[in-house]
Image (cartoon, coloured by chain):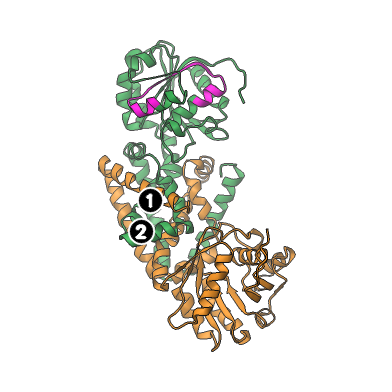
Chain colours: A green, B orange
Amino acid sequence: MTTPTTPLFDTACFVGIGLIGSSLARAMRKHGLARRLVAFDISEKARTAAQALSVVDLATDQPADAVAGADLVVIGAPVGATDAVGAAIAPHLKPGAIVTDVGSVKLAVIRDLMPYIPEGVEFIPGHPIAGTEHSGPENGFAELFEGRWQILTPLPGCNEKAVDKIAELWRRVGSMVEIMDPHHHDKVLAITSHLPHLIAYTIVGTANDLEGHMQQEVIKFSASGFRDFTRIAASDPIMWRDVFLNNREAVLEVLQRFTEDLTALQRSIRWGEGEVLQKRFTETRAIRRAIIDAKQA
Amino acid sequence: MTTPTTPLFDTACFVGIGLIGSSLARAMRKHGLARRLVAFDISEKARTAAQALSVVDLATDQPADAVAGADLVVIGAPVGATDAVGAAIAPHLKPGAIVTDVGSVKLAVIRDLMPYIPEGVEFIPGHPIAGTEHSGPENGFAELFEGRWQILTPLPGCNEKAVDKIAELWRRVGSMVEIMDPHHHDKVLAITSHLPHLIAYTIVGTANDLEGHMQQEVIKFSASGFRDFTRIAASDPIMWRDVFLNNREAVLEVLQRFTEDLTALQRSIRWGEGEVLQKRFTETRAIRRAIIDAKQA
């Protein structure tokens, strides 16, 4: 269903056209939010797929060709590439353009990108709380952001009209928008996203290290709980490497809390403290109910 | 859809009519596998629901009334209640009856139940690799076991015809049957099921301990990974307490492996070892693909 609206932007440029970038491009196309969609990506595979699927009108490996005419630039690259992205796009950014990003950490992206943002260009950092375990432009879809939260972490003194315009973009693709301090963002996401992914990668890795025939049985009987972890442990390895390297302090802090809690439960199992286990396992049900009530299940 | 078949059993008695027991009762009714279905449960709520929903023909709190005429007895109680269940049902078991169970641990159930099994009655321990995070007879459904594995761990010297009959029961409700040594079962399930549940309970508990407003944000932004853990952390607390207390050695052993692996990743994050993280996160994708190929995703 296409809603006829006035385009918010003339040309939107996606720097990195992976799962998130291509989903936003599809959603912008569907809702008529830009007249022209272009992509700059260093991966030939991603460029070919994005163009073959008509996700964008042009996909190029030349930043000048992609960025020069754009009044919106959306960075959807692994956060560890932010410095390189900044250096590549900065000379071509047009005055009045708005730059935003979709990175899972915010302080490091701000630190790495801000030095490249010229006078007259606004950078509004953002993070859509949406995604799947699949990667690449072929796996994107226009409905990915519907009913999901979009966090924006604008810097003090930035142009408020630019913030409003980026917020409007996300609302038009179906998201709810939340404004947050970038430091707070990195702490919240360390617990809701980074720790769960680290734990999932670990447990699946532990199983992966088992002897061959035991590993086969883990796969066979995975429906008993294990498979739920394998889904998030199938997420993009480079993206996640960069998240952990760029949100180190917050991740190590929540990991410390988690390890303490796990050690306490381990001790309760060893000493047969049934009441402690039962109490702990009962408390966690309330959070599940709250997530269902918040329509985020 | 009811398939007209000769009933395998005359009267099937469910000792504990929760999620699993009521699902098997529904499946047996659907496929015409017993002439009469009865339940013994100490919970009035479960009895009332099971009878109101016609899951069984009779639900009683008197073991004699339920067990006396049954040629099949299915124990679906928390594994910590096995001793009490054995004492309650043993005097009423009829010669030639087959007893089976659906417990998530097998060595402890065999240890606790075998002393009560009289001469002329067969006990064939079992474990369906199926379930949901919901509890109680109102949440059961006949299709729960379709395409899932059923593990049987018969003891040396048991009646092979009884094993065949229980295997046939599970095949008729849609399961694939695997015969396994009970000791091996407890080791495999410690990694595929018990460890994942313990980890999920821990991470959700860690979030639950956060200060109030931080906790609200964890719920709000749970779609970024956390919510996948809350589903399994909403499983029945008493059932899981009993699993950990009754599979202690195997759980503590896999937990040790997991903790070593997590500590290694923690160290790689602290020291910025990107290659180690990327390698580890890439390996785990293969297991996900294998689970999808095995149709257990």
Q: Secondary structure at mark 1?
A: helix
User: In front here: A136 or B109?
Assistant: A136
Residue drawn at (38%, 56%) of the image: A260
Residue A110, can we see it? yes
Residue drawn at (42%, 47%) of the image: A196
Question: Label 2: chain?
Answer: A
Amino acid tagged 2: Gln
Magenta-drawn stretch contains A37 = yes
A46 vs B44: above or below: above
Could you say where residue B181 lies in the image, as x and y percent from the top left?
41, 73
> Label 2: which residue?
A215
Magenta-drawn stretch contains A159 = no
Label 2 crowding class (10 Å Cα cut-off): few <14, some 14-19, many 20+?
some
Could you say where residue A163 lies in the image, as x and y percent from the top left?
50, 21
Q: Which residues are magenta?
A: A26-48
A51 vs B92: above or below: above
Q: Secondary structure at mark 2?
A: helix
Q: How many marks overall? A: 2
Q: Are marks 1 and 2 in contact (CB under 8 Å)?
A: yes
Asked if residue A223 lies left or right of residue A61, the reply is right
> Label 1: which residue?
B287
Q: Are discs 1 and 2 both within one chain?
A: no
Q: Quadrant of residue A134?
A: top left
User: In front here: A231 or A56?
Assistant: A56
Asked if residue B139 lies left or right of residue B154, the reply is right
B64 vs A285: above or below: below
Amino acid tagged 1: Ile
Q: Quadrant of the C terminus of chain A?
A: top right
